[in-house]
Image (cartoon, rainbow, N blue to C red):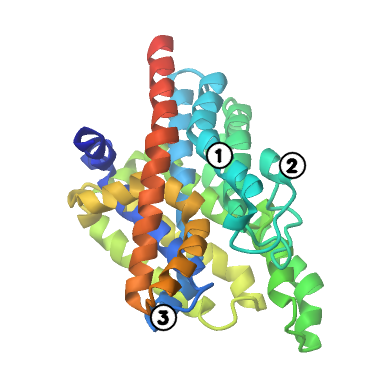
Amino acid sequence: MIGYWRRISDADGKHLAGLDHLRALAIILVFLCHYRAYERPGWVDEVGLFGWTGVDLFFVLSGYLIGNQLMRQLDAGAIRFGEFYLNRALRIFPAYFLVVFLYFAFPFIRERDGIAPLWQFLTFTQNFDLDFGNEGTFSHAWSLAIEEQFYLLLPLTLWSLAGSRIWRHGPWIFLGIMVFGLLIRGILWLQVMQPFYDAAITENRFVAYNKWIYYPTYNRLDSLVVGVAIASIMNYRPRWCAWQARRGNLLLIGGLLLVAVAYFIFRGDRLTFWPTVVGYPILSVAYGMLVFAALSPSCILYRVRWSASAVIAALSYGIYLCHKFLNHLMQQPLDVIGLEKAGNTRVLICAVVSVLGALLLNCLVEHPFLRWRARLNKRES
């Protein structure tokens, strides 16, 4: 078991330490956001109000990591589609489908009454037409659906553009996609949300916003595109990389300041027009600056390695999958022993249980499939 724990805490080398810190931050934000479903301390409510942005940080990280992997394959000759899709499937599918099975086989673990149809979970299309008011169980899988769609389409997109001159204008392509998302969100807001505000209707406002604006893939490309843009810079813009290598801490400070700007943009009613239209690009660029900084050898995030963040980062996928139903299952036992509902101890216990659940999931499901994946890749190479 000691050897297994050491393997978990080894974050693939010091050069990824900065990304581990950010991945750990992202899952902590998501956990605190979802814990607001229960009575909680004031600080959880305050942080959790911005905790939903942890998903956007995950998107930037995925955009960079997957984009960088595919661009390196292109530079080496061609994208190895079979290997890429198999690797993604062995990484994502086993743990995910086990959790889906648990949700449908044992309804008592569900954190809410309703759940989306099984076929949407099986096809990773849950983020479309998702009614949070009636299908709130495992609703956070919407972000995984977007990631799977991204994994499917990005290799095909890069391959199709590989021999085209348009690829030389990469920054303009990324900017164009972000402007497209800005326009679509603005149009949808005017059509869907404006009537709610004109009539001062608050009932179902949040549900409608999530269904038509927050969940659909075409509205949430900003963060993924920023991540891919960072990968493009790291692979094809040596002058920018040289600048970044020397100014990691400056990028970090700039990113944190821009995160603060995004925080105040979303601080009030984040469902209103301007946060919806311009807030997401600003948030995406802010988190993109943090990721870009974390890749710089001069940045403190890169240079300081902390085993705790490496472990949380390694277990972040498992925590993401199981923290909601584990939080739900823990409430009654903690009530029975008389633990304060809005106390810090209850939050800490639920967080530890989520980490232990993720560790169990990693040990029994993720790790065996990742070992199999490593053997397959070694055999093919």
Q: Which residue is at the front of the view, 2 or 49?
A: 2
Q: Residue at x 41, y 70 (%)?
A: 334
Q: Residue furthest bottom?
A: 200
Q: Secondary structure at mark 3?
A: loop
Q: Where is residue 353, by image quadrant?
A: bottom left
Which of the two discs, 3 and 1, labels the residue nearer the N terminus?
1
Q: Tell me whether the residue at label 3 lies in contact with that at label 2, contact meaning CB atoms closer than 8 angstroms.
A: no
Q: Is residue 91 above or below residue 380?
A: below
Relative placement, left or right, of 100 versus 21 is right
Is residue 295 visible to the viewer in this orientation of the structure?
no
Q: Residue at x 26, y 46 (%)?
A: 17
- Amino acid type shown at disc 2: Trp
Residue 58 placement (x, y as % from top left): 46, 52
Neighbour class for label 2 at 10 Å: few (<14), some, many (≥20)? Answer: few
Q: Which residue is mark 1?
A: 98
Which of the two discs, 1 and 2, labels the residue nearer the N terminus?
1
Neighbour class for label 3 at 10 Å: few (<14), some, many (≥20)? Answer: some
Q: Quadrant of the C terminus?
A: top left
Q: Which residue is mark 3?
A: 342
Relative placement, left or right, of 121 versus 380 is right
Q: Which residue is at the front of the view, 254 or 276?
A: 276
Q: Is residue 337 above or below residue 74?
A: below
Which of the two discs, 3 and 2, labels the residue nearer the N terminus?
2
Marks 3/2: CA–CA distance: 37 Å
Relative placement, left or right, of 172 versus 366 is right
Q: Which residue is mark 2?
A: 119
Neighbour class for label 1 at 10 Å: few (<14), some, many (≥20)? Answer: few
Marks 1/2: CA–CA distance: 15 Å
Q: Secondary structure at mark 2?
A: helix
Marks 3/1: CA–CA distance: 31 Å
